[in-house]
């Protein structure tokens, strides 16, 4: 799918290259939260910062391209941010998985019930959800797998389901989606 988008074989108005699948889901969630239509936008996790930047650069240099592309890197890559090169960053100053986890965790006093229900658990289990999140905040060594661990702790919930519940809660409880879309507004207006 990513190769077809790069070569122009897929009908699209904009390609967005990101570092990985979590960043892909984060951008999609932010766009949905802000009412951006994803019909003509293709978002691709590229397996790292360098890959995303290089593919974006080459794509925009290609005189035969049929649509533009942008690159959205993780928040810890602000040194590479460049409006001229169409390289932007996600909110936060770390990996997006860690950032989303911490944003949601920091608001547990307000969102524990909503997160519990989003995870498909009875609202009465919110104290267990809070307990699991606090335990994982202390013991997790790699934030890239934290949602898998949380899913396992809460009765083997699928990792993708847990990630999306956290992303939805992040989008509903912060202004981050609006800030991200505001950064991309010019690029998005060019393709709509």
Image (cartoon, rainbow, N blue to C red):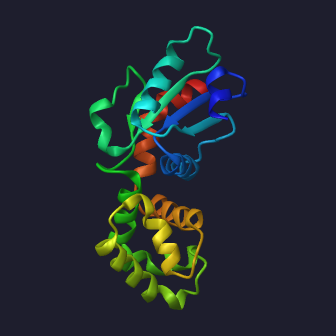
**In the shown orientation, is residue 68 left or right of residue 103?**
right
Image quadrant occupied by the C terminus:
top right
Where is residue 179 shown, x and y percent of the image?
Answer: 40, 45
For the residue pair 115 and 43, the one nearer the viewer reads as 43
Q: Residue at x 26, y 33 (%)?
A: 79
Where is residue 32 shown, x and y percent of the image?
Answer: 58, 50
Up/down of 16 relative to 60, above or below: below
Q: Residue at x 31, y 74 (%)?
A: 139
Where is residue 63 shown, x and y percent of the image?
Answer: 57, 8
For the residue pair 176 and 17, the one nearer the viewer reads as 17
Query: Could you say which quadrant of the image residue 82 lies in?
Result: top left
In the image as oriented, which residue stretches furthest toward the front?
141
Query: Could you say which quadrant of the image residue 117 lies in?
Result: bottom right
Image quadrant occupied by the N terminus:
top right
Where is residue 75 shown, x and y percent of the image?
Answer: 34, 45
**In the shown orientation, is residue 121 left or right of residue 82?**
right
Up/down of 35 relative to 41, above or below: below
For the residue pair 61 and 31, the one nearer the viewer reads as 61
In the image as oriented, which residue stretches furthest toward the top?
63
In the image as oriented, which residue stretches furthest toward the bottom?
124
In this rendering, does residue 58 appear at all?
A: yes
Q: Residue at x 59, y 42 (%)?
A: 36
**In the shown orientation, is residue 2 left or right of residue 166?**
right
Up/down of 122 relative to 91, above or below: below
Up/down of 63 relative to 47, above or below: above
Q: How many marks?
A: 0
In this rendering, does residue 114 appear at all?
A: no
Q: Residue at x 48, y 33 (%)?
A: 185
For the residue pair 31 and 156, the one nearer the viewer reads as 156
């Amino acid at each position: 799918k990513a190769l077809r988008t790069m070569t122009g074989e897929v009908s699209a108005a904009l390609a967005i290259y990101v570092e990985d699948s979590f960043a892909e889901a984060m951008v999609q969630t932010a766009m949905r939260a802000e009412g951006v239509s994803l019909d003509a936008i293709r978002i691709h996790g590229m397996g790292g910062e360098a890959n995303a930047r290089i593919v974006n650069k080459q794509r925009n240099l290609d005189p035969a391209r049929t649509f533009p592309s942008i690159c959205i890197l993780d928040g810890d890559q602000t040194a590479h941010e460049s409006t001229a090169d169409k390289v932007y960053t996600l909110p936060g100053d770390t990996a997006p998985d860690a950032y989303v986890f911490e944003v949601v965790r920091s608001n547990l006093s307000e969102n524990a019930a909503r997160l519990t229900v989003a995870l498909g658990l009875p609202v009465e289990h919110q104290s267990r959800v809070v307990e699991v999140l606090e335990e994982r905040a202390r013991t997790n060594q790699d934030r890239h797998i934290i949602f898998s661990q949380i899913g396992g702790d809460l009765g083997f919930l699928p990792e993708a389901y847990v990630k999306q519940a956290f992303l939805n809660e992040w989008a509903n409880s912060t202004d981050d989606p609006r800030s991200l879309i505001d950064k991309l507004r010019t690029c998005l207006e060019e393709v709509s």
